[in-house]
Image: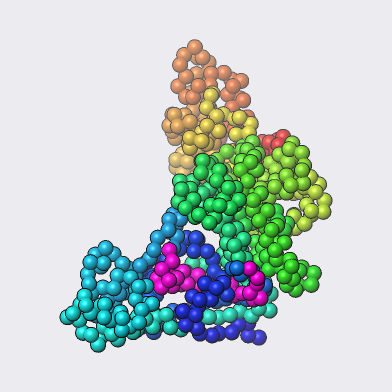
Amino acid sequence: MTKYSVNQHPVSVLLGWIESDNIAIPEMQRPFVWTSAKVRDLMDSLYRGFPVGYLITWQSPVIPVKGGGTAGFQQILIDGQQRVTALRAAISGEKIVTKRFETKRIIISFNPQTEEFETATPVLKKQPEWIYDIRDYLGDSSLAALKGYMENNPEADENHVFAALQKLAAIKSAPIGIISLNNDLDIETVTEIFVRINSKGVQLSSADFVMSKISANGEQGRNLRKLIDYFAHLSVNSQSYDVLANDEEFEKTKLWAAIRWLKDDTGDLYDPTYVDIIRVAAMVAFQRGRISSVVRELSGLDPETRKFVPDRVPVAYDKFEDALLRTVNEYDFKQYLMIIKSAGFIEPNLITTSNALNFTYALYLLMRRDKMSDSEIRRITRRWFVLMMLTGRASGSFESNFERDLERIARLGPAAVLEEFEQSELSDSFWKVTLPQRLNTSGANNPQFKTFLAAQVKNRARGFLSKHLSVQSMLELRGDIHHLVPKDYLRKNGVNDKRDYNQVANYALTESGVNVRIGNRLPVDYLAEVDTQIDRSNQPPTLGEINSGADLSANFIENAVPESLRTTTAENYEDFLMERRAMMAQTLRTYYEQL
């Protein structure tokens, strides 16, 4: 069954529909990723009658339009945004926004004598044979344009110039193909079509579709989209504050006031992208884990009847706006990050997936909304985040997991659901068997190893063979990862696969000086040096600063290093790894139970 219809319309008609909001496109405030050369090539193709690809739209029911009222049905542009933005920039003279959120015009120049298009430059502006800005000529009659041009170029072939100017003016009449998806298609099908489309080699996502849908709801939708974009941008680059503040219309809204605090923000533990922000807000507003569900909610789809109900649309947008304002709230955002840091996750490189941050932030906001006690909110947030890091619940089919978890939380409450997960997923066999198996890896970005480092931060552990320098300070200063059994020795003695000698169970954070002093020596050799400095505690230490046996034993425990390290060689290296994995897992268990 055909799911679409195909029609052609002149460029001028298309631009008119966009101006009157019959076709909704993302705000021009969104960064434009095309180069000016691509805009030039688009104008050249239209001039020569070449095909420029199809735009794809989808009808969305009952959307408010400028000036009040509704359009009944409005087409939402779901593919072709860059081409339409290029047309508006070159033909209508609208400014685009760069990746740095700076506004500028893209000006295209044209030479009627050679029929060439170029990106405008100061040099071309001084050359009379070039029309510096084609926009100035597209609105004039060809005869008026010819007269002005020939006065500055009396030697030019008048007939040739006139023909070229007629073709230039005809760009506004050039046909553009529009594929209109049927309005009776379900949201899932439209989303699938959207995700499968490639736009100039850039894979589109469900989040891009959501952003298109958000911006379709008049002034409120446009401002919500800006809120998402600007928050994501300022989280990474607060220096862009002054540039974004030039958006006078948005600057007057409460949404801008809500994110103004980012101008002084220097943290980088959690810099949510626009996808992350939509995901968190969707979970808070609608308790839905799938990002595509936002389109259904904002379209007014009744989940029971599967029909569009116009009255549901404004309610859904208001709920989404409220959730977004909660998401970007300075107090809640900073309090949430303090909770994550209190679990030992003090650096962004300790967090291997933003999905765990997204879910637990949404959970935190839901608990705050329900006025749970601060102590309970902190405990549940910490434990849930660490559980997700340890079990991989935020990877794979995480959206399905989120959907189920939110549904159960709504029915039973977060404390009860967390307890269920702890009983089912953090059983005795998990700590003794599953977790050590997951630590059997050479990937330094292994989430279980990263959580072990966070546990060391929480426990205020010192670096291996350090008396004063903590794991936390070494993480902040990018301290050295040391091989407890040197890899050079292992490679020379038959352990040749880097997946074996680079096992995370063979890693420990050390001071640079300690790492250099250890070099390629066997544990029995470098630990003998430590023992000697303990025996001669009245003399300056030569390897680290530990000068007592009790302190050395404590340091081994802080780093989950078994005493068998002293006798570890290439022959019994695998036994050492197994013993250390078990100790690391036990450290993680104790750490989790104390959160």
Q: Magenta residues?
A: 68-95
Residue 466 visible from this viewpoint: yes
Most extreme residue toward the top is: 538
Q: Identify the residue at image location x=64%, y=36%.
A: 342
Q: Give the x, y percent position of residue 163.
A: 30, 86
- Quarter of the picture containing the N terminus is bottom right
Say left or right for 37 vs 577. Answer: left
Residue 563 visible from this viewpoint: no
In the image, 391 versus 255, the foreground residue is 255
Say left or right for 6 vs 158. Answer: right
How is the protein colored in the picture? rainbow
In the image, 571 versus 500, the foreground residue is 500
Q: Is residue 468 magenta?
A: no
Most extreme residue toward the bottom is: 159
In the image, 51 versus 497, the foreground residue is 51
Q: Is residue 69 magenta?
A: yes
Q: Identify the residue at image location x=63%, y=85%.
A: 2
Q: Identify the residue at image location x=60%, y=82%.
A: 4
Q: Give the x, y percent position of residue 308.
A: 73, 72
> Which quadrant holds residue 293?
bottom right
Give above or below for 562 relative to 230: above
Q: Give the x, y percent position of residue 348.
A: 55, 44
- Total marks shown come to 0
Q: Identify the residue at image location x=53%, y=18%.
A: 547
In the image, 113 versus 179, the foreground residue is 113
